[in-house]
Image (cartoon, rainbow, N blue to C red):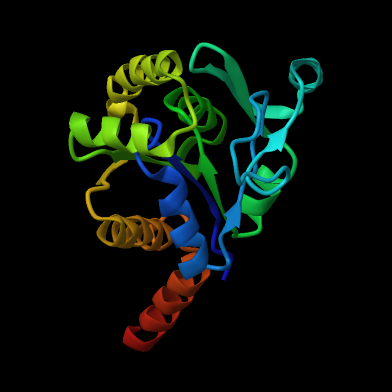
Amino acid sequence: MGRRGLALVVAGPSCVGKGALIQNLLRSCPEVELSISVTTRKPRPGERDGVDYHFISVAEFERMREAGELFEWARVHEAYYYGTPVAGVREAIEAGRTRVFELDYQGAGSLREKLGSDAVLVFVLPPSFAELQRRQRQRHTEQPDEMAVRLRTAVKELSHTNLFDYLVLNDDLEQASQELQAILQAERTRGSRAGYEGLIAELLAETRRVIG
């Protein structure tokens, strides 16, 4: 049975908990592959090159973009570039594998344009604006002016939730993680990618033979 894979995109405002949800998904579903983006921003404390992101220079990013080596790219938070490398994405889907992507709404839209229904878009919501601010302050990685930029970006993100197939409220991380896993399972068994065409044809043929 040739089950088709998918690209699971997780997006949402900065500090909404996308990374934690993705890590929980990877632990619960070890067969899921993480797509590692490239970015021109500097690593935050604890981030590792080649694990969290590929941290590259602006010049290298521009070279990859011009060479067609990026599936999609976007300028985020008015300062940094992020992109998704082309290598292996379509091949993974054709082979029935799932890749999960952490993108902004622009990147999610670009991936949908390239992959069509093979891309499943999930937007993560905070329970309130106050909680979103609290999570941003708790991270202690940005100066006040940088936090203001991220809040302006959050307005853009929240204004494009209509682009997404699913909305997940991250009020409780465990509950939100279960919802994300349920979305993945539902999409894997969607008729258009479940890979049961051969089985259905066989069942029909045998049933028709028996009933004459």
Image mark count: 0
Position of 112 relative to 35 (above/below) = above
Q: Position of residue 94 (x, y in %)?
A: 64, 53
**Residue closer to the observer: 196 or 56:** 56
Residue 200, placed above or below residue 148 = below
Residue 39 point in image, percent of width and height: 65, 28
Q: x and y percent of residue 53 in the render?
A: 65, 39
Q: Please tell me which residue lies in front, 72 or 36.
A: 36
Task: Locate the N terminus by quadrant.
Answer: bottom right
Q: Residue at x 39, y 36 (%)?
A: 15
Relative placement, left or right, of 92 versus 131 is: right
- Residue 85 x %, y %: 70, 35
Is 20 placed left or right of 33 in the picture?
Answer: left
| Image quadrant where residue 50 sits | top right
Side of 26 relative to 58 (left or right): left
Answer with left or right where residue 31 lies relative to residue 60: left
- What residue sits 66% from the left and 44% below the top? 90
